[in-house]
Image (tube, rainbow, N blue to C red):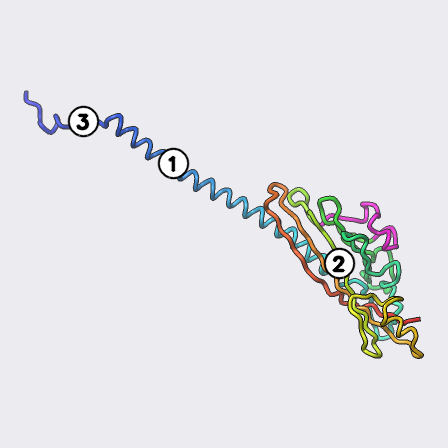
Amino acid sequence: MLKSPLLHRQKGASLVELMVGMAIGLIIVAAAASVYVTTVRGGADTLRSAKLNIELRGAMDIMVAEIRRAGYIGFDGNTNLSTNPFMQANTNLTLVGSDCILFAYDANGNNVANTSDQFGFKKNGSVVSMRFGGTAPSTSAGCSVGNDSWESITDDNSIIVDTLTFALTYQCLNSKTGAGSANQACATGNAIYDAASAAAVKSDLVEIRNVTITLVGHHKDDALTRMSLSQSVRVRNDRIQTVP
């Protein structure tokens, strides 16, 4: 029986052709795997950045909102702001070093400075901690109060706080003359304060305060995923003093 010419011409793939096909297939698989790995890695980086952003911005928002309240007291028209109990020596807005700030405000609305009205923020190891009341009334000792009055507001399981600093600037104004001095608290040695003290009729002085907060941190699992925030806070309650 004669063989069909068509059947006679049919041949399988050669070894070279098979190897070339396999190589092309491996290249395609490797490219797909590379795209997949890049996508997964990019997603992980995005999640870490989002977590860092939420933690640090959340902490910054809390600090800004609370510091703005420093010195608050209910005002009914008869309140003597120059004797505000939330702006006295042991309750006034105070920096202890550069990484701890302490202040007080009338949280319970009774116009009396209690230990439950003492607040503050500090860098405590790798977290930002907030003071919710204190066992020591003195602001100068507040940063060393036991851990029972401080609570973390950042999560060190995922975020490491590298830097938390506070800088306090002042402006002192004479409410009678309008004279003012920049970046000086209303106290002895300030020309505005000394001039008011020497005057025949004493003046009320207004101390305007601004706090600049700097917060830097990174993700615990990736030191390169970092964020730095800085914000200036105008304390809404000015400190009123009547010179002696």
The amino acid marked with disc number 3 is Lys
* Residue positioned most to the top: 1
Give me the C-alpha separation between circle 2 and circle 1: 56 Å
Mark 1 crowd level (few <14, some 14–19, many ≥20, 10 Å Cα): few
Residue at which label 1 appears: 29
- Secondary structure at badge 3 equals loop
Instruction: Indicate whether 187 appears above or below 60.
Output: below
Please give the count of numbered marks on the rendered protein.
3
Relative depth, front residue between 188 and 27: 188
| Residue 192 horizontal/vertical position (percent) | 85, 72
Disc 3, disc 2: CB below 8 Å? no
| Residue 70 horizontal/vertical position (percent) | 79, 62
Q: Nearer the viewer, mark 3 or mark 2?
A: 2
Residue 103 figure quarter: bottom right
Q: Which residues, given as a range, are shown in magenta?
A: 134-153
Mark 2 crowd level (few <14, some 14–19, many ≥20, 10 Å Cα): some
Relative depth, front residue between 48 and 132: 48
Give me the C-alpha separation between circle 3 and circle 1: 28 Å
State which tag comes first along the sequence, 3 or 2: 3
As drawn, is 111 to the left or to the right of 168? right
Q: Quadrant of the N terminus?
A: top left
| Residue 231 horizontal/vertical position (percent) | 68, 60
> Which disc, if any, is residue 11?
3
> Which disc, if any, is residue 167?
2
Mark 3 crowd level (few <14, some 14–19, many ≥20, 10 Å Cα): few
Relative depth, front residue between 132 and 39: 39
Disc 2, disc 1: CB below 8 Å? no
